[in-house]
Image (cartoon, rainbow, N blue to C red):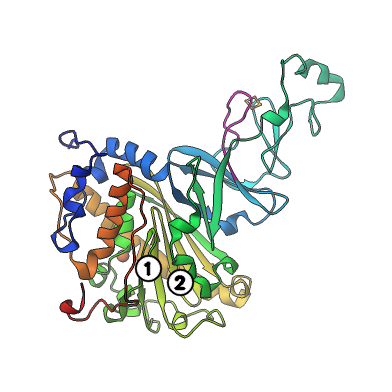
């Protein structure tokens, strides 16, 4: 089925129904999920011009560790320098433009070397060698034929790798392709303060998984931020994350937040309680699960004893590559006795995530093969979806603003409706 009549996706009128108050609003136009023209624009306006999650800090701990990532269709290299600084560069050689590193991660040692004519770059991006310079692999008796002296005005200091703004928030690596990026603190809003007690910088990566998802990344995000589907899609999860323990946890920032408090004990299907909790948590954090979707593309599930990240990389309107990262306290990650519990936890999250992947792929099919005209949203369950869709709409029309949060913290979601807005 084609995408329907041409729509200008940068005009405010396109989002008029999504702009209404939650109870009167309709979901984004279906083209936002299925149309490659929308996707191409969204790639520039959302992913090419703001903070975007790019990976997990713990895959880049050692000097020389690199990861190649796709952000808005640009290939970037994330690399840890010998000085301990994490940097990001466009994955392109300054000589004649070869891709420097193929996809994936690993360790490059002391230099990033171009496979074409063997230019070498320091981990900090400086061009340190055309073949004749220090570090050359060219035997001395053959160096004369590779001389570049005749290249007028050539100074390798002018040919360092093209850098990209990078920052971290706890275990999350974020990049920003905007040449004049807003501070990450503006994007995060109050999230860093809300999550400060968890000391997120300290957690260590214990397990990673990848999923190929035949759905738009926004369907993954929207599914993540509503509890409506829990009883039917996640019969195991709902037992350790009961509906009546669900609260809003929404401050100002480019994120949606909710929490389960108190979290429940494990069931025979697994749960969250197998590992020792982080010591020193405040009484609220110690019994709560925080569920954050940081716009545009990463989920942070923060528990007293582990953190689970779901990182979505859209590659087409209906295709998303997903990486999940299970992190634990440093003592737990290295403890041989904890490995079985970590495996159990990873299996639990994997089964929950597979349930989510299956259902969002089904939504994608529904949107892609029908004239679906947009659906309603209810405040109790879907205000976060409304919040997220309006963030997308803002970026598409060129608006930059950070939405406010709740006046009252921790509003229970399953109280009488008249207690809610
Ligand atoms: S293109 Fe990289 S060394 Fe020539
Ligand atoms: Fe779900």
Give the residue at mark 1.
251
Q: Are marks 2 and 1 in contact (CB under 8 Å)?
A: yes
Please state if 204 lies on the left or on the right of 360 as rendered. right
Q: Is mark 1 within 8 Å of ligand 2?
A: no
**Residue at the farthest right position:** 141
Q: Position of residue 317 (x, y in %)?
A: 31, 42
**Nearer the observer, 45 or 311:** 45
Give the residue at mark 2.
194
**Nearer the observer, 259 or 9:** 9
Is the residue 274 above or below the residue 141 in the image?
Answer: below
Q: Position of residue 385 (x, y in %)?
A: 27, 60
Q: Main secondary structure of the magenta part?
A: loop
Q: Quadrant of the C terminus?
A: bottom left
* Residue 142 highlighted magenta (yes or no): no
Tell me where residue 187 sits by quadrant. bottom left
Q: Which residue is drawn at the image coordinates 45% and 60% (left, top)?
A: 188
Q: Is mark 2 within 8 Å of ligand 2?
A: no
Alpha carbon distance from label 2 to label 1: 8 Å
Nearer-N-terminus badge (2/1): 2
Q: Quadrant of ligand 2?
A: bottom left
Q: Is residue 215 visible?
A: no
Magenta extent: 88-100
Q: Which residue is drawn at the image coordinates 21% and 47% (left, top)?
A: 15
Q: Position of residue 102 (x, y in %)?
A: 56, 38
Crowd tier of the residue under label 2, counting other residues whose Cα lies within 10 Å: few below 14, some 14–19, many 20 or above: some
* Residue 96 highlighted magenta (yes or no): yes
Q: Quadrant of the N terminus?
A: top left
Label 1 element class: loop
Please state if 17 lies on the left or on the right of 252 as rendered. left
């Amino acid at each position: 089925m084609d995408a329907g009549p041409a729509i200008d996706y940068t005009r405010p009128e396109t989002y008029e129904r999504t702009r209404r108050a939650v109870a009167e609003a309709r979901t984004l136009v279906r083209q936002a999920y299925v149309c490659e023209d929308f996707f191409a624009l969204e790639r520039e306006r959302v992913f090419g011009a703001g903070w975007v999650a790019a990976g997990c800090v713990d895959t880049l701990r050692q000097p020389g560790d690199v990861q190649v990532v796709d952000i808005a269709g640009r290939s970037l290299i994330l690399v840890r320098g010998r000085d301990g600084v994490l940097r990001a560069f466009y994955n392109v050689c300054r000589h004649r433009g070869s891709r420097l590193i193929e996809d994936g991660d690993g360790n490059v040692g002391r230099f990033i070397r171009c496979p074409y004519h063997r230019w070498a770059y320091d981990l900090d991006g400086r061009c340190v060698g055309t073949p004749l310079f220090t570090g050359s692999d060219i035997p001395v008796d053959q160096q004369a034929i590779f001389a570049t002296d005749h290249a007028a005005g050539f100074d390798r200091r002018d040919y360092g790798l093209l850098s990209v703004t990078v920052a971290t928030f706890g275990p999350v690596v974020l990049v920003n392709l905007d040449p004049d990026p807003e501070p990450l603190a503006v994007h995060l809003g109050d999230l860093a303060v809300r999550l400060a007690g968890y000391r997120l910088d300290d957690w260590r990566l214990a397990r990673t998984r990848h999923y190929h998802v035949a759905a738009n990344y926004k369907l993954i995000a929207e599914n993540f931020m509503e509890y409506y589907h829990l009883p039917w899609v996640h019969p195991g999860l709902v037992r350790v994350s009961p509906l009546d323990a669900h609260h809003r946890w929404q401050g100002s920032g480019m994120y949606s937040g909710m929490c389960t408090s108190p979290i429940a004990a494990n069931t025979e299907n697994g749960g969250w309680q197998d590992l020792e909790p982080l010591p020193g948590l405040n009484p609220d954090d110690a019994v709560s699960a925080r569920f954050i979707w940081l716009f545009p593309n990463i989920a942070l599930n923060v528990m007293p004893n582990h953190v689970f990240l779901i990182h979505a990389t859209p590659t087409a309107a209906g295709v998303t590559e997903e990486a999940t990262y299970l992190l634990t306290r440093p003592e737990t990650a290295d403890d041989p006795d904890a490995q079985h519990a970590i495996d159990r936890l990873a299996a639990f999250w994997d089964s929950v995530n597979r349930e989510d992947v299956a259902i969002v792929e089904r939504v994608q099919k529904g949107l892609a093969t029908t004239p679906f005209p947009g659906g309603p949203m209810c405040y109790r369950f879907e205000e976060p979806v409304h919040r997220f869709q309006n963030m997308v709409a803002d970026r598409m029309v060129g608006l930059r603003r950070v939405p406010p949060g709740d006046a009252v913290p921790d509003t229970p979601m399953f109280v009488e409706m008249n207690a809610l807005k």
